[in-house]
């Protein structure tokens, strides 16, 4: 089976790519390696997969030094011509779309980057999946689509018409566009609403990594609302396991919405934020809880 993984230099993309490679699948990974956070981390992930930074060129293939069944392409999802050439050449069986501009707060400062990456880039993926008869498109959505909903656990049947960030709005838009393509063209799509994901090689802007950095460096941990909040933290291995299992479960015409599916991937048991920080401290063998500072009341 040949699989395209977009966002292969990202946190989740890297781990899923590694899993598929070790399962013997033929994998092509693509990423634009943007500067939203330190690119050294992205290149380090690629290096772990045998992709040498010095050999990466724009729109050029880089063969892995470690795995014969993996190669990488630095390109933009917004570059429709390059993306179409890739689909025409490789004839993928499945696509796992994990690329996109992440970050809720960053969307306030740079809204156009979210429209380009998460909307334009995704419609380019949908068009190519449609024309090249992809057997299954799996794509990353987000728990942020639930907005200010305080009901736990969240359900895929909950109304998500009121996003509170542009990032969430783009993810909801992706779900709507995927539904349209599933309905019109019988393109099997599965959208995955990820919850706060953490683990090795994690994104430095995510709260678990920010907490760990503060603990290890002896800095105060900033929390809001006196830390009185719940977060559904999900370990990366559980995300990878879920995605791999979903690959073979292709939505068909028997679905409530034919060829279209949405799934939450989380632990469904939100954790009090302060409890998570305590466990983080215990794991890291630090006694920094007294340095937690409260912000925002």
Image (cartoon, rainbow, N blue to C red):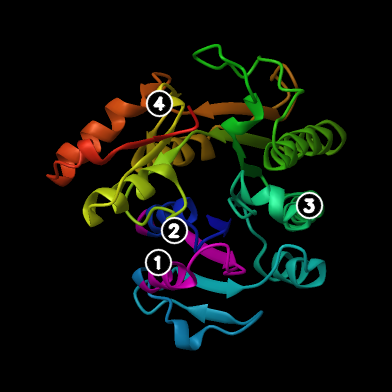
State the CA–CA distance, disc 4 to disc 1. 35 Å
* Residue located at (65% from left, 67% from top): 90
Marks 4 and 2, the one that precedes in the sequence? 2
State the CA–CA distance, disc 3 to disc 2. 24 Å
Magenta-drawn stretch contains 41: yes
User: Dot 3 corresponds to which residue?
Assistant: 115
Q: In terms of image quadrants, where is residue 14?
A: bottom left
State the CA–CA distance, disc 4 to disc 2. 34 Å
> Closer to the camera, 257 or 108?
108
Q: Is residue 238 above or below residue 14?
A: above
Label disc, if present, on residue 226 of the rendered structure:
4
Residue 203 lies left or right of residue 61; in this view the side is left
Q: Are marks 2 and 1 in contact (CB under 8 Å)?
A: yes
Magenta-drawn stretch contains 56: no
* Residue located at (50% from left, 72% from top): 71
User: Dot 2 corresponds to which residue?
Assistant: 14
Q: Is residue 152 above or below residue 187?
A: above
Residue 231 appears in the picture as rendered: no
Label disc, if present, on residue 45 of the rendered structure:
1
Secondary structure under tag 4 reads: helix
Foreground mark, 3 or 2, reads 3
* Residue located at (71% from left, 64% from top): 87
- Picture coordinates of residue 165, whole percent (x, y): 70, 37
- Picture coordinates of residue 193, whole percent (x, y): 57, 33
Magenta stretch bounds: 22-47
Q: Alpha-carbon neighbours of circle 1 within 10 Å: few (<14), some, or many (≥20)?
A: many
Residue 147 appears in the picture as rendered: yes
Q: Alpha-carbon neighbours of circle 4 within 10 Å: few (<14), some, or many (≥20)?
A: some
């Amino acid at each position: 089976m040949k699989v395209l993984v977009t966002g292969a230099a990202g946190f989740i993309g890297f781990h899923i790519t590694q899993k598929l490679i070790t399962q013997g699948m033929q994998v092509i990974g693509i990423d634009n390696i943007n500067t939203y956070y330190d690119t050294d981390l992205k290149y380090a992930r690629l290096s772990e997969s045998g992709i040498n930074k010095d050999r990466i060129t724009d729109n050029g293939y880089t063969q892995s030094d470690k795995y014969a069944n993996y190669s990488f392409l630095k390109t933009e999802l917004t570059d429709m011509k390059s993306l179409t050439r890739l689909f025409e050449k490789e004839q993928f069986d499945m696509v796992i779309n994990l690329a996109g501009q992440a970050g809720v707060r960053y969307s306030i400062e740079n809204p156009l980057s979210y429209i380009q990456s998460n909307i334009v880039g995704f419609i380019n993926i949908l068009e190519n999946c449609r024309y090249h008869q992809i057997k299954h498109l799996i794509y990353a959505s987000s728990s942020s689509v639930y907005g200010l909903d305080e009901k736990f656990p969240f359900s895929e049947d909950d109304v998500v018409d009121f996003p509170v960030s542009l990032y969430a709005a783009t993810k909801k838009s992706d779900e709507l566009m995927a539904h349209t393509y599933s309905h019109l063209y019988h393109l099997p799509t599965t959208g995955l609403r990820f919850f706060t994901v953490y683990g090795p090689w994690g994104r430095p802007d995510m709260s678990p990594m920010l907490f760990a950095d503060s603990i290890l460096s002896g800095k105060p941990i900033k929390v809001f609302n006196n830390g009185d909040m719940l977060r559904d933290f999900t370990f990366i291995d559980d995300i990878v396991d879920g995605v791999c299992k979903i690959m073979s479960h292709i939505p068909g015409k028997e679905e409530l919405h034919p060829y279209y599916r949405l799934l939450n991937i989380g632990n469904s048991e939100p954790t009090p934020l302060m409890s998570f920080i305590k466990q983080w401290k215990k794991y890291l063998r630090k006694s920094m809880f007294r340095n937690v500072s409260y912000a925002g009341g």
